[in-house]
Image (cartoon, grey):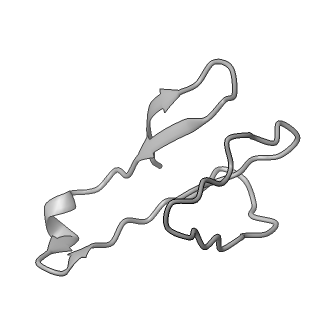
Amino acid sequence: MNKLIFECEKTGLQILRPQCNLDTIRDGRGQISTYLPDEKLEEFNIVFFHAGMVRGMHYHPHFVEYSL
């Protein structure tokens, strides 16, 4: 499973690090990392950001949200 490297006490936000050898998935093009959540995913969202704009700045305590 993924290694927890940070958890916010106020919001429960977690930052995870994949448990793998990064040298085996990284090359000149970039890298591929896989994250497996502990719970079943119910939905996912793709968010597009316009340059210079801010989104978010809040959280939803009634469900788990993942951001990549």
* Image location (x, y in percent) of residue 63: 83, 46
* Residue in the picture at 66% in, 29% down: 12
**Which residue of the protein is positioned furthest toward the top in this rendering?**
9
Q: Nearer the viewer, residue 50 or 68?
A: 50
Q: Nearer the viewer, residue 38 or 60?
A: 60
In the drawing, does residue 28 fall left or right of residue 14?
A: left
In the drawing, does residue 1 fall left or right of residue 53?
A: left
Image-quadrant location for residue 57: top right
Q: Can you say whether 32 is above or below 58 in the image?
A: below
Q: Nearer the viewer, residue 60 or 16?
A: 60
Q: Nearer the viewer, residue 21 or 17?
A: 17
**Which residue of the protein is positioned furthest toward the front in this rendering?**
52
Image-quadrant location for residue 13: top right
Q: Can you say whether 11 is above or below 48 in the image?
A: above
**Which residue of the protein is positioned furthest toward the bottom in this rendering?**
29
* Residue in the picture at 63% in, 18% down: 9
Q: Can you say whether 21 is above or below 46 in the image?
A: above
* Image location (x, y in percent) of residue 56: 68, 49
**Which residue of the protein is positioned furthest toward the right in this rendering?**
62
What count of labels does the image hold?
A: 0
* Residue in the picture at 60% in, 53% down: 54
* Image location (x, y in percent) of residue 25: 22, 71
Image-quadrant location for residue 61: top right
* Residue in the picture at 50% in, 60% down: 52
* Image location (x, y in percent) of residue 19: 34, 50
